[in-house]
Every structure is written in C-alpha cells, then in structure tokens.
C-alpha cells in the first residue's frame, strides 16, 4: 500500500473535530470516493475525533490518501495517550458509554468503515485505524 | 462565541444550519431554541439541515433533544432537507431519530406545522363555546 498524501492534525478542542471532518472530506474527494462513501468516512472520523478528545484527553489523527492494488481510499489513524479502553468488546457495543454520549461512536465508526482496527493499553492510550475504499 | 440565528415566522421558529457545527455551537443552539420557544410562545420549530454534509451522533442527539424539549413545551419540531447520503449514514451509524418529525423540504415542513397550528386553533375555538 502506498500513501499518496498525508496530513497530521492535533485534536485538542471541538474546533479540531470540525477540522478533522474537513480534512477527511478533502482526502475522500481526492481519492475519488462517491458521495455516500464520503459521508460515511467523514461521519466515522467525526465520531472517533470526538472520542479522542472526550475520552483520550486529546491526541492526533494521521489522515492519508492511500492506494493499494488499483484501489484508492482514505485511511485515518487516531492516537491518544489517555486511560485506554479496558474492555474493547463492551466499548464496541451500541449503547455502551462511560461518558455523556449515546454509545454509538465506536461501533458506529466500525460499521461505517471497510477496515477497522483498535489497539488499547490500559493507562497508556488508544490507537484506532479506519479505512474506506472506493 | 458564534450563534446560529433563529428567525421568527408567525407562531413558528425557523433555523437554517449553514455551517459545519462544532459541539459547543450545537449545544448553544439547543439552549437558545428552548428559551425562544417560551419567549415567543412558539408552536412550531422548523430546522433546515439541507446544508449539513454530515449528521453524527452528537448532532443527531441535539436534534432528538430539541424535539423532546419542544414537545414538552407544546411545540412541534420538524427537521427538513436531510441529504440522502446523510440519511443512509445515520441509519448505519445506529441513529434512526425516532422522536424527530421530518419532511423533505421547507415547504412540506411548514405545511406540517401550519396543519398543527390550525388544529390547536380549532381546539381553542371549541373551548370558548
């Protein structure tokens, strides 16, 4: 897989969540994603950026326009140094929340993506990667 | 801080969301609308989201909350102009906005609110007799 374009954004405030959405949109258009695919990956990015801010205490996203065997897409990697997620399976279930949200963010972001991976270590932080292909 | 403008249109309030809202702006809109419903004795709230490129769980919850609070304050909320891609994404996200009335466009949304206003006027006439 090769990276065509990449940008790293800090996530420190709710304005940054909007910036993550805008950057995702730019990359999704550049990758040639259709309108529905664009909307899905931007929405997933918004959920994960908010999680990074609210639960991870802030962090950053690496947003990439990628290409692999003739396919083009967008890959986003969110990283924080927050408390980590003790039970990932529980956190992926709809309705599970330790905060003020609806508990749709993580599971929803997974459903809206073609690829999803999560690594979380208690006390060290969380890293989540999503990708959507054309 | 920025605010989303709320227009008064007869007995109804009209909101057109034209910007990509950050969470504090969405929360402020929820609070502003609640107080304006009471101040203006509004019976209907029309929220035009045709300019919104996405509705995530936070904005979805805001729409749900506005609909629930306005119902308690005796006003109807109608959300209009949702883009098809946004609707598809919302359902996949797991938000079906069951508590929110929707209409395809502003005209149909306004017709829903006007119908409700006529009904409540008729009830008022009945009680006077």
Image (spheres, coloured by chain):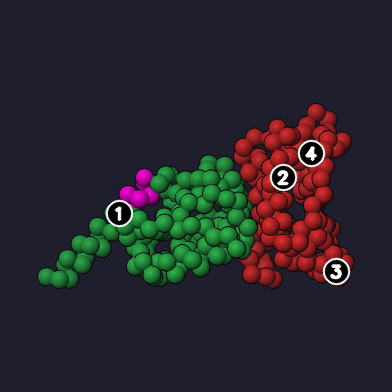
Chain colours: A red, B green
Tag 1's secondary structure?
helix
Disc assigned to residue B114 = 1
**Magenta span has A52?**
no
| Neighbourhood count class around disc 4 (C-alpha, 10 Å): few under 14, some 14–19, many 20 upward | many
Question: How far separated are the C-alphas under marks 3 and 4?
Answer: 30 Å
**Residue at screen point 28% across, 59% down:** B117
- Position of residue B75 relative to residue B107, above or below, is below
Query: Where residue B62 appears, x then y in whole percent?
Result: 54, 61
**Residue at screen point 49% across, 66% down:** B32
Instruction: Confirm whether residue B42 shows in the render.
Output: yes
Q: Look at the image and give the residue range highlighted in magenta.
A: B107-112
Instruction: Confirm whether residue A94 shows in the render.
Output: no
The chain that hosts pointer 1 is B
**Residue at screen point 54% across, 49% down:** B18
Question: How far separated are the C-alphas under marks 1 and 4?
Answer: 48 Å
Mark 3 or mark 4: name the one nearer the start of the chain.
Answer: 4
Q: Which residue is mark 3?
A: A122
Disc assigned to residue A24 = 2
């Amino acid at each position: 897989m090769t990276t065509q374009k990449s940008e790293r954004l800090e996530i420190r405030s709710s304005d940054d969540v909007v910036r993550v959405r805008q950057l995702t949109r730019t990359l999704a258009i550049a990758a040639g994603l259709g309108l529905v695919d664009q909307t899905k990956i931007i929405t997933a990015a918004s959920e994960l950026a908010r999680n990074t801010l609210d639960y991870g205490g802030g962090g950053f996203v690496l947003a990439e326009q990628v290409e692999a065997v003739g396919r083009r897409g967008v890959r986003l990697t969110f990283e924080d140094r927050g408390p980590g997620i003790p039970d990932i399976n529980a956190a992926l279930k709809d309705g599970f929340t330790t905060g003020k949200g609806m508990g749709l963010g993580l599971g929803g972001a997974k459903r809206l993506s073609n690829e999803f991976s999560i690594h979380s270590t208690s006390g060290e932080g969380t890293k989540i990667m999503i990708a959507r292909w054309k | 801080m920025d605010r989303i403008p709320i227009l008064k249109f007869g007995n109804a309030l009209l909101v057109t969301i034209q910007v990509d809202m950050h969470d504090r702006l969405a929360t402020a809109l929820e609070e502003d609308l609640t107080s304006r419903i009471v101040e203006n004795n509004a019976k209907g709230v029309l929220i035009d989201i045709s300019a919104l490129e996405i509705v995530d769980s936070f904005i979805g919850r805001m729409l749900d909350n506005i609909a629930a609070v306005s119902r308690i304050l005796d006003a109807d909320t109608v959300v209009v102009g949702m883009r098809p891609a946004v609707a598809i994404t919302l359902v996949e996200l797991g938000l079906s906005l069951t508590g929110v009335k929707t209409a395809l466009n502003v005209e149909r949304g306004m017709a829903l609110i006007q119908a409700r206003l006529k009904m409540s006027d008729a009830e008022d006439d009945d009680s006077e007799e």
